[in-house]
Amino acid sequence: MRLLAIDDAFDIGGAEHVLLRLAQPLAERGIDVVLATHPTAALVSLWRETGFQAVPTAMPRDRSIRGPQGQVSPLRILNSVRLTAGQSCAVARLIVQTGADVVLANSHWTHLDVATAGRMTGIPGILYVHDLPLPGIGQRLRTLASALATTTIAVGPAAAAGLHRAVVIPNGVDNTQFYPGPADPQLRADLGAGPDEVLVVMVCRPDPVKQADQAFAALSQVPQVKVAVLGDWDSPQGADLRAEAERLLGERVRFAGHRCDLGACLRAADVLVHTSRSEGFGLALAEALSCGLPVVAYKADGIEPVLGHGGGLMVPGQDVDGLAEAIRSLVANPRRRRALSVDGIRVARRWTLDEQADRVAVALRRTRSRS
């Protein structure tokens, strides 16, 4: 069975990590995944390193329907419709070119492309929903795409809300990379922390929904910690937030970029801080728990289903002072950190990559059988 996966992200976020980690387990279950994405996307080289086929495909850089001030723009809506029509035809051609049995949309702006192309070609189209849409027109567009698609896979109940023919499959943790173990002293030093210092890590992109500015503001109130930010921040928005972090934290913060050794980085740290406004499923949190790393996070959709079972502290959203106090409480109490570490390792056993791959493979085969 051949699956054509469409992703239009230039950088690597959670959705791209999920797809990358599923490729090999799906291949072991008889499903060959072909990736179609931007020729210059960061995912292309990593995908090819795994030995799987990538088809470079021209895709629009910006289909946002909102103007510079965040307001919905009628002209941007018309432009987005025009681009979506063109991309739907392009995806239909890719389906024929690759001989795909099923086509999957892995990123938000590809949902309508894939759903429409599936209708055009008679090939089943699947939406893989990793996050929560913006309220209003964003939600309506996603609901429309799910009505046109054959199946929707959502990573959590909140992500599945209001969608048609949706099956919830939580993300799984790759236990070959994310597991408890001793910290590497050299890696801690590379991330900016000495042997007796407390190292706080953040795993995120400079996306507004991640609210990294609030994490930096809270950490500025905890002067005794060092901070390492893991993720791709090579964008204008990333540059602005990075300047803000360096203004607030000075030499205490280090931007370590995208890391292939993310599990080792989590084992090297003492606390993970996560300030996302919402998540489809808090995979970064589950990976941290699997490594025995305590988490401090805002209580939000997609976060509570992970941390609600133990392994970390949740703070009401937007409460920067409360976030700082929760971080301080763990920094000052190594015994509590150890207790949360043990609890988190126990909790994380419920999310495995093998189970996720099993359920995704079943969903793909059922979807194909409906065509």
Image (cartoon, rainbow, N blue to C red):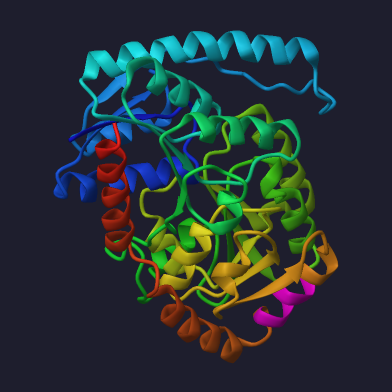
Image position, residue 253 (x, y; %): 64, 54
Q: Residue at x 84, y 26 (%)?
A: 71
Residue 273 lies left or right of residue 56; in this view the side is right
Find out whether residue 294 is within the magenta segment. no
Q: Magenta span: helix, strand or loop, mainly? A: helix
Find residue 290 and report its image quarter. bottom left
List x then y, in percent, for residue 175: 31, 66
Instruction: Give the residues drawn in magenta, as a range.
Output: 324-330
Asked if residue 223 shows in the view, the reply is: no
Q: Is residue 274 above or below residue 347?
A: above
- Residue 170 vertical placement versus 96 (above, below): below
Total numbered badges shown on the rendered structure? 0
In the displayed structure, 154 sits above or below 11; it is: below
**The N terminus: image quadrant:** top left
Q: Residue at x 22, y 39 (%)?
A: 50
Q: Residue at x 41, y 35 (%)?
A: 150
| Depth check, front residue: 22 or 136 | 136
Rendered location of residue 120, percent (x, y): 39, 15
Depth check: give the residue in front, 239 or 163.
163
Q: Is residue 138 at least partly visible in the picture? A: yes
Residue pictured at 56% horizontal, 58% vertical: 157
184 with respect to 252 (left or right): left
Quarter of the rendering containing residue 228: bottom right
Q: Position of residue 244 (x, y in %)?
A: 77, 43
Left or right: 223 in relation to 169: right
- 11, above or below 160, in the image: above
Identify the image quadrant of the C terminus: top left
* Residue toward you, 246 or 303: 303
